[in-house]
Amino acid sequence: MSKILVKVAGLAVVFAVLFGGVAQAAEAGTRQQQESAPVQSTGETRAVVVGSLAFVLMLGAAGAVFWYTARSRHSTE
């Protein structure tokens, strides 16, 4: 069980680093857009980033459940 927790913690760190970079890139892109067109809002960009993060985390959780289920199954043959 501790091996699984270590793997999940490592995966969480990878996602945090990856999406931290995505959020910073989106923020930099938003700043660049604001300089060129100051009337646009940042709400749409933030919604896309948060929605994408939630989607990837749901897929990751589903994959982890499938992986854990497949590993814990025993052959009935």
Image (cartoon, rainbow, N blue to C red):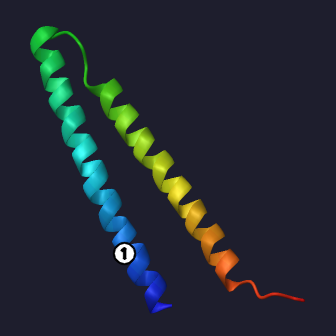
Position of residue 4 relative to residue 44, above or below, is below
Position of residue 58 relative to residue 67, above or below, is above
The one of 10 and 47 positioned closer to us in this rendering: 10
Residue 22 horizontal side relative to residue 62, left or right:
left
Category of crowding for the residue at label 1, using alpha-carbon neighbours closer than 10 angstroms: few (below 14), some (14–19), many (at least 20): few
Q: Quadrant of the C terminus?
A: bottom right
The residue lying furthest to the left in this view is 35
Position of residue 30 relative to residue 73, above or below, is above
Name the residue at 39% across, 67% down: 11
Residue 59's quadrant in the figure? bottom right
Residue 74 horizontal side relative to residue 67, left or right:
right
The residue wearing badge 1 is 9
Name the residue at 15% across, 31% down: 28
The residue lying furthest to the front in this view is 77
Residue 17's quadrant in the figure? bottom left
Residue 10 coordinates in the image, percent (x, y): 35, 73
Q: Secondary structure at mark 1?
A: helix
Residue 2 horizontal side relative to residue 63, left or right:
left
Residue 49 coordinates in the image, percent (x, y): 35, 38
Name the residue at 29% across, 58% down: 16
The one of 40 and 58 positioned closer to us in this rendering: 58
Residue 61's quadrant in the figure? bottom right
Residue 29 horizontal side relative to residue 9, left or right:
left
Position of residue 9 relative to residue 27, above or below, is below
Residue 2 coordinates in the image, percent (x, y): 44, 91
Looking at the rendered structure, the kind of residue marked 1 is Ala
Residue 48 coordinates in the image, percent (x, y): 39, 32
